Image (spheres, rainbow, N blue to C red):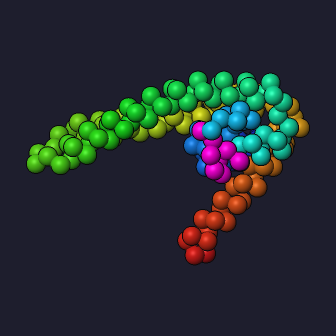
Amino acid sequence: MKKTVFSGLVAAALVITYVSGASAFGRLGTGKSSEVGRRGFMKERIAKEIGLTQQQKQKFLEREQSIDKKILGLRQEKEKMHLWLRQELKKDSPDKKAINRAIEKIGSINTGIQKDRTEYILWMRSQLTQEQKAKMDSCFEQNRSRADGSRRKVRGK
């Protein structure tokens, strides 16, 4: 049982990261023009398939926007670190200790982003009914299978 729940959470995290880079349910049904292409379609399709209510969509949107703001700040900080790192590596005598600290900081930021995403997924799942959870898991499994298939095609397998 624990393994199934954990597998479901891992699958959900992978699909959410794959589909949106942030979460699976942001900007659902809001009609915002910022949602273009496949990601907007996928989010709307998933919301419809699992039967989210307007209230759930709104709750998820509000929570996601809060997390997006936090993650945006972390990504900006990470980009500054990458820029500094590139500049430092071009020097004739780069500061190896500072480079290692920068690399560790980038890793720490990545870990923080993943923890925030995972926290959102866990919170989101806690807001769903058992039936919605089952439908969501099924959607994510289908999406993961499609993604795995496309990666195999790219790799020539």
Residue 52 location, quadrant: top right
Q: Position of residue 110 (x, y in %)?
A: 46, 38
Residue 10 seen: no
Residue 52 seen: yes
Which residue extends farthest right? 131
Query: In front here: 144 or 53?
Result: 53
Say whether residue 36 is magenta. Answer: yes
Image: 57 above or below 155: above
Say whether residue 149 is magenta. Answer: no
On screen, residue 21 versus residue 48, left or right, reads: left
Locate the N terminus by quadrant: top right
On screen, residue 18 versus residue 78, left or right, reads: right
On screen, residue 153 versus residue 138, left or right, reads: left
Image: 142 above or below 32: below
Q: Residue at x 62, y 35 (%)?
A: 118
Magenta stretch: helix, strand or loop mostly: helix
Q: Residue at x 78, y 40 (%)?
A: 47
Locate the C terminus by quadrant: bottom right
Q: Position of residue 23 (x, y in %)?
A: 64, 38
Residue 155 location, quadrant: bottom right
Q: Position of residue 61 (x, y in %)?
A: 68, 28
Which residue extends farthest left? 92
Residue range highlighted in magenta? 34-42
Query: In front here: 38 or 3?
Result: 38
On screen, residue 110 versus residue 146, left or right, reads: left
Query: How many badges with numbers are in the image?
Result: 0
